[in-house]
Each structure stands twice: as structure tokens, then as C-alpha cells.
Image (cartoon, rainbow, N blue to C red):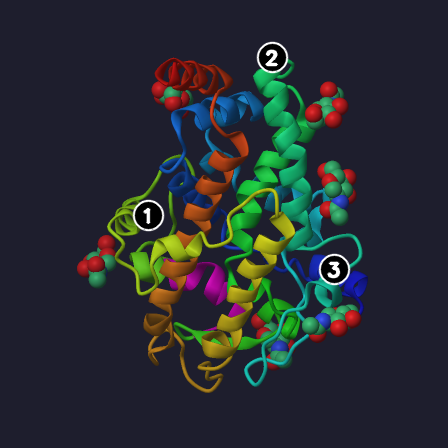
Amino acid sequence: MNFRHLTSISLFLGISSGWNTDVHNQIGFMAEEFLSPYTASILGQILEPQYNGSIGRAAAWADAYAHTQEGRFSYQWHWIDVHDNPPSSCNLNFTRDCAPGGCVVSAIANQTNILRECIADVESGALTGGTNLTCSYALKWVSHFFGDIAQPLHASERAIGGNLFNVTFGGKIARLHAVWDKWIPYTDANVTAFSTQSIDPFFTALVARIRADKFFEAPYMWLACSDPTTPTECATQWARESNKWTCDYVYGKVDQESDLATNGYTVGAFPIVELQISKAALRLGTWLNKLVGTPETFKHEKQIVLGSTTE
Ligand SMILES: *[C@@H]1O[C@H](CO)[C@@H](O)[C@H](O)[C@H]1NC(C)=O
Ligand SMILES: *[C@@H]1O[C@H](CO)[C@@H](O)[C@H](O)[C@H]1NC(C)=O
Ligand SMILES: *[C@@H]1O[C@H](CO)[C@@H](O)[C@H](O)[C@H]1NC(C)=O
Ligand SMILES: *[C@@H]1O[C@H](CO)[C@@H](O)[C@H](O)[C@H]1NC(C)=O
Ligand SMILES: *[C@@H]1O[C@H](CO)[C@@H](O)[C@H](O)[C@H]1NC(C)=O
Ligand SMILES: *[C@@H]1O[C@H](CO)[C@@H](O)[C@H](O)[C@H]1NC(C)=O
């Protein structure tokens, strides 16, 4: 189906897009745990004051914005419509799959490049107090899209990212997309909602697991591509990982005839959702640290120290 067509259908149906907003907030709060103090201080000057320097609080904005008339153009940036055939074949091709007007991969690249200039503006003193909206939006988009790109159904065209794929969850008809956006994380954490203001214990525990290297795939491997100077390459790789889950589990194990809340599907998805959320957070924190870099004063002092030791 034509992409513009998909977008208008999605808007018409009010289809949900991305992890539930509170899950996005939590991914942002997790990422904050990995920011250097210097990075946090720079980002605090980029965000509009209402976020109090918190990318966690700002990480859900992009969904609300996409549903406004003004922000409608950015709606399709939340996913990439991979033209494959899960569960029998999964295969992402950026050139083929990224729609004209952008997709989550190109949006990450584009907004990362904007953010780089914004960081330089803060360092030169040209930007303080979140007064440049292009910059605040770029940071809010990046913080949001790192979450979206890790959601398997954001890298799959089938049934509009699973939005038209009906399943039963807890005795009710649900969209497969919504099951992944919120029902699996909520069930895993045994909650009905997460905080939008500060990190919840479930996500604090994931941060601790990242630090303790307690995942079935080692966190350093998640950072194999994490250089902000090659954003398209890295984001394509991340989207490919998400896309692979649509074959390996999302559609590969789904059963439309029984209740996903009780047939083992949801419990089986916990490790996948925990992994994908944790990858998103560590990647976001690492990306922002690399993009901001080391303060000039520190680099300068280091050079002096190195210079004096060689004398
Ligand atoms: C804003 O951030 C500062 C420093 O991180 C914190 O001490 C303060 O409690 C925060 N204020 C609000 C209203 O969240
Ligand atoms: C990706 O898609 C483009 C455009 O359709 C095509 O030219 C290219 O051969 C594809 N690449 C691979 C590796 O299939
Ligand atoms: C790149 O970012 C600019 C500024 O936000 C926006 O106007 C433009 O549409 C973006 N392009 C793509 C393909 O994301
Ligand atoms: C905001 O920052 C961007 C990136 O440096 C710059 O291109 C743009 O001109 C700035 N906008 C305003 C209104 O200063
Ligand atoms: C999916 O469920 C909705 C109700 O939530 C219904 O309107 C729609 O027709 C169903 N689609 C299919 C393909 O069964
Ligand atoms: C989930 O929460 C409910 C109510 O807060 C509690 O009764 C139940 O024991 C919890 N279950 C687990 C597995 O933590």
C-alpha cells in the first residue's frame, strides 16, 4: 500500500504509534542514568524549561505532536514500513523501505545532525534555556525514536505494524500492536501504568541488569554500532534487529485463536521486551554522550597535562 495512504488510514483510525507514552518516558529516564554530568548539563539548555532538563519527561512529546495539525508531517517518522513477509521472511532494505518524507531511520539521522549543531550552540553560549524550538524538538524526537525503533512492530509493514491484526488479550479483542506497546510491558511489571515524571522500579531494575551484564545478549554488543557520525547505518542495524523479532516471535508465535494473556505468548515475550527497551535506553544515553563529547575545558586541561608530561 502507498505510504501516504497508510498514514491517512492510521490517522483516521487513531491508531496508536509507538510504545505507550509512559513506556517512552521510562526509556528516557533509563537513558538519563547513563548520561555523563556534562551531557546532562548541555541537554538541560536544549530542552524547553517545562521538562526541567529531563529527556525522560520529554520522551513522549513526539506522539502528541504527531497527532496535531502542525506536527502531522512527523507522524510517519515513528516507524519504517518494511516490505517483507513475516513470519516466513524478514528482510529490511533501507532504500526500498524508507518512505519519501522519512521514516524512523532517516528521522534519527536527520535529527541527530540537527542536534549536533544545537550542542555546539550551547557550548558557544548562543543557546541557553531551551529557546530554540528546532533544537528542543530534535532532542525530543531523538529521545522518542530510539524507543520506537526498538519496538518490533515499528519495523514491519504487515497489517500496518500489527494495528489491523486482531488478537485476544485478557478476554478482549486487542490489536497486536497495542499488545506490544503496552500490555506486555504492563503485565511484565505488574502495573496498569508507569510514571511519566520519574523512573519506576521496573526500569531501575533493568538499568541494574544492564550494568551487571545480565541479559542473554551482552550490552556491549548492543553498542556495536553507536557512532553518531554514521546515524543511518546504526539506525538501520537497530531497525533490522527489531524487524527480525517480527519473524522470530511477534508473528512467528502468535495465535489468533487463543488468549495471548494466558497462552504463554505474553510471558514468552517478556525477555524480548526487556531486551529491546534496555537496548533503546543504553543506546540513547551512549549516543547523546558521544554526540556531546568531552567539554572543551577538560580537553584543554588534558592537553596541557599531556604536554607537560612529555617535556
Ligand atoms: C528539577 O531538576 C532539579 C535538578 O535535577 C531537581 O533538583 C528538582 O527537584 C527538579 N524539579 C522538579 C519540579 O522536578
Ligand atoms: C534494496 O532496494 C533497492 C531499491 O529497491 C534495490 O535497488 C537494492 O538492490 C536492494 N538491496 C538489496 C541488498 O536487496
Ligand atoms: C529533517 O528535519 C527538518 C527539521 O526538523 C525537517 O523539516 C525535515 O522534514 C526533516 N526531513 C526528514 C526526511 O526527516
Ligand atoms: C536553532 O538552532 C539551529 C541549529 O544550530 C539553527 O540552524 C537555527 O537557525 C536556530 N534557530 C533560531 C531561531 O535561532
Ligand atoms: C478487528 O477488531 C475491530 C474491533 O476492535 C473490528 O472493528 C474489526 O473489524 C476487526 N478486524 C478484523 C479483520 O477482524
Ligand atoms: C501484582 O500486583 C497485585 C496488586 O498490586 C498483587 O496482588 C500481586 O501479587 C502482584 N503479582 C506479582 C506477580 O507481583
> Residue 7: image x %, image y %?
74, 60
Q: Is residue 91 left or right of residue 269?
A: right
Residue 73 makes an appearance in the image: no
If you read the primary sequence from the N terminus, does the residue marked by circle 1 or circle 2 appear first?
2
Q: Considering depth in this image, is 47 or 281 the residue closer to the camera?
A: 281
Residue 178 included in the magenta stretch of the image: yes
Name which residue type carries label 3: Thr
Q: Considering depth in this image, is 125 or 102 the residue closer to the camera?
A: 125
Rendered residue at 34%/65% (across/down): 271
Q: Is mark 1 within 8 Å of ligand 6?
A: no
If you read the primary sequence from the N terminus, does the residue marked by circle 3 or circle 2 appear first?
3
Name which residue type carries label 1: Phe
Quickly name the residue at label 2. 125
From this view, report whether residue 102 is shown above or below residue 115: below
Question: In the structure shown, which secondary structural element does the residue marked by tag 2 occupy?
Answer: loop
Rendered residue at 40%/79% (across/down): 259
Q: Is residue 237 left or right of residue 202?
A: right
Label disc, if present, on residue 203 of the rendered structure: 1
Q: Does the residue labelled 3 lie within 8 Å of ligand 3?
A: no
Quickly name the residue at label 3. 7
Q: How crowded is mark 2: few (under 14 residues within 10 Å), some or many (20 or more)?
A: few
Magenta residues (range): 172-185
Name which residue type carries label 2: Gly
Q: Considering depth in this image, is 287 or 307 the residue closer to the camera?
A: 307
Separation (CA) of disc 3 from disc 2: 40 Å
Q: How crowded is mark 1: few (under 14 residues within 10 Å), some or many (20 or more)?
A: many
Question: In the structure shown, which secondary structural element does the residue marked by tag 3 occupy?
Answer: helix
